[in-house]
Image (cartoon, rainbow, N blue to C red):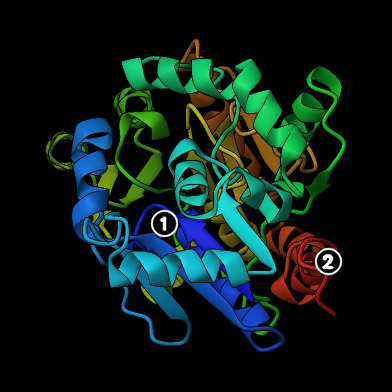
Amino acid sequence: MILFINFAPIEFMGGAERWMHKVAVYLNKKEKSEIICAGEKIANVYGQMVLHRNFSQRVQTTDISISHISFHTLVPFTKSHKLLLKKFTQARIIYAKGELLELLICLYFGGPQVLKKTILGLHSSFIYLYPSSFFDWVHKFIYESFLSRIVFSRVKKTHVLNLKDKNFLEQKWGITNTALISNSVQSSAKTEVKKSETGKLQVLFVGELIYRKGIDLLILIIKNSPVTIDFYIAGDGPFTKKIIDLCKLHSNCHYLGYMDHNKLLQVYSKMDCLFLPSRAESFPFVFLEALSNGLVILSSDAAAINLPRNYLYSYSLNSVQPFIDCLKKLQVRKNNKDLNKEEIKRYFEQTFTDEKVLPILSSILFEVK
């Protein structure tokens, strides 16, 4: 049996939750798999204290077994507690999101010996290049401490999504049991690549409207960009009201709200560029969804993803002007018909589809063929 451990309720369906759900369903066809996550009440205690938001259940799913940890489950000798202990004992492999809360769940129910069969997945940025809040600095202190190094040296394997994290673990800490396997999404080969219907550059932001995603920077960039660049913002979070107010003042800013996956794919097809000025990223799904629709990506250097230079532009967050200058250059490229969506989509199909990545993931990480 394979257990997947994620603190946020899987029904929240953020990037890490989507990945875990997809892989668990894929592996469940070959070996019994189950997802264990915090219940909504427990998750929201942390969400309110640290993230200043709740983990709403955006998607209901019935295609994989899911166990939710409640306050009652944490009480020793209760029926639900014993059941979870049994699952941790019987599991052949435990895949846990490589963060503190998931690790505490593993140690609480499995004991220190559980590390020998645990794979830690770095789905969030391991290294914070731009810590700003108190909790960012706490994250940096804990994750780059000697205790973290000990944990990573004792787990079965570490799953990294980008070269930056792999180099840190191997070159700084001497951790050799790493596997670099990128995220993936379904092939879009049957989906027609569309050219945007306007001469303006169509720029899309997708994600939670939180400080870590660089929403404050996005607002500054929109305020200082020419009206020939249209911005579309999809997502929700603490900055929602500020985005709505911004749209009232700037006619080239459009708020789409939270959108389900199918509706969002329709929006991607009309865009030219995905913009994500995030302060911390590992390998966001939105990058792949953008590439699958032929979009150029503009991001911060906090998302250290290796893509061809013509498809990905990244800059330091120390100044907003380079981002604005890049958007203006992309506008010129569009006017010159030099934004080749078909070429970008072909690159995606050759590299990042589920059909190519999931069999490799299954074999290398989970030893399932």
Kind of residue sitting beneath label 1: Gly
Residue 82 has which mark? none
Residue 136, percent from left and from top: 41, 21
User: At 51% from the left edge and 21% from the top edge, which residue is drawn?
Assistant: 142
Residue 117, percent from left and from top: 71, 56
Total marks shown come to 2
User: At 50% from the left edge and 58% from the top edge, which residue is drawn?
Assistant: 5
Q: Nearer the viewer, residue 248 or 124?
A: 124
Residue furthest front as drawn: 77
For the residue labelled by badge 2, is the local secondary structure a helix, a strand or a loop?
Answer: helix
Residue marked by disc 2: 350
Residue marked by disc 1: 14
Q: Does 19 appear above or below 335?
A: below
For the residue labelled by badge 1, is the local secondary structure a helix, a strand or a loop?
Answer: loop
Q: Quadrant of the C terminus?
A: bottom right
**Left or right placement of residue 178 versus residue 18 in this view:** right
